[in-house]
Image (tube, rainbow, N blue to C red):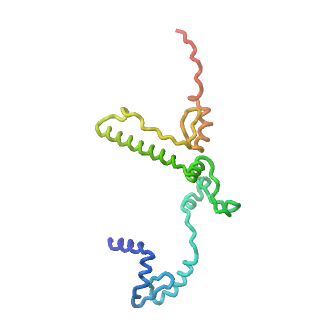
Amino acid sequence: MAASGSRKASAISVTSASIASMDDGPVPDGMARCSVCGRNFAEDRVAKHMEICRKTKSKKRKVFDVTKHRVQGTDAEKYVLRKGKTGVAASSGSKKSISGPAASNAAAATSGGKGDWRRKHEEFIAAIRAAKEMKAYLAKGGKLSDLPPPPPSENPDYVQCPHCSRRFNQTAAERHIPKCKTMLHNKPKPAAKGRRV
């Protein structure tokens, strides 16, 4: 079983350098070399292989879109970004325009938002340090409730709900805020009436 595993690994690691070295080496008896790819085949099969090999080399393979095939026929299909096939966007080779937080992330990435990565990195390091401290404290026998809460991570792309002060991404905020507005716990409490004893 181990021999077949190593055979597969060696077959996968064939590179253009190894193909070039195959061209220099002698052709084994009863074999013929393909002039397109340089691999050796049985003399009666090399003609058929060369025909297929030429066709394969001349065609450019289409990139397989895993996401498209995975979500095809599901409710998630409408949320997957697609490249425009018609109009000016397709002719210029650009993708569909994105709105919301994704657009600001893309704009920050292209405009050189160098300060953003540093802030995210510092938050990440602080979160890891807090997790290590918590783990060490729990290992010593401490209670989790004795520890302060972990440092909050602020995402500038999130929208804060004016009713409950929680933060959401753009699409979640659009769903949440109207619901939160009508919730009872967000309504002002009526003034307490004097009770008679």
Q: Residue at x 46, y 86 (%)?
A: 33
From the top left corner, tell me how far across and down residue 32 is, in percent. 45, 88
Q: Residue at x 48, y 44 (%)?
A: 119
Q: Would you place residue 29 above or below residue 95 in this image?
A: below
Task: State the quadrant of the N terminus.
Answer: bottom left
Q: Residue at x 51, y 46 (%)?
A: 115
Q: Nearer the viewer, residue 57 or 23?
A: 23
From the top left corner, tell me how far across and down residue 141 is, in percent. 29, 36
From the top left corner, tell me how far across and down residue 94 is, in percent. 63, 60
Residue furthest top as drawn: 197
Q: How many numbered discs sit on the rendered protein?
A: 0
Q: Nearer the viewer, residue 7 or 197?
A: 7
Q: Would you place residue 194 above or below residue 40 in this image?
A: above
Residue furthest left as drawn: 140
Tell me where residue 124 sits by quadrant. Answer: top left
- In the rendered view, does 14 fall on the left or right side of 47? left
From the top left corner, tell me how far across and down residue 99 is, in percent. 63, 49
- In the rendered view, does 55 fall on the left or right side of 26? right
Q: Nearer the viewer, residue 24 or 70?
A: 24
Q: Would you place residue 6 above or below residue 96 in this image?
A: below
Tell me where residue 168 sits by quadrant. Answer: top right
Q: Nearer the viewer, residue 190 or 39?
A: 39
Residue furthest right as drawn: 87
- In the rendered view, does 81 fall on the left or right side of 50? right
Q: Residue at x 44, y 79 (%)?
A: 19
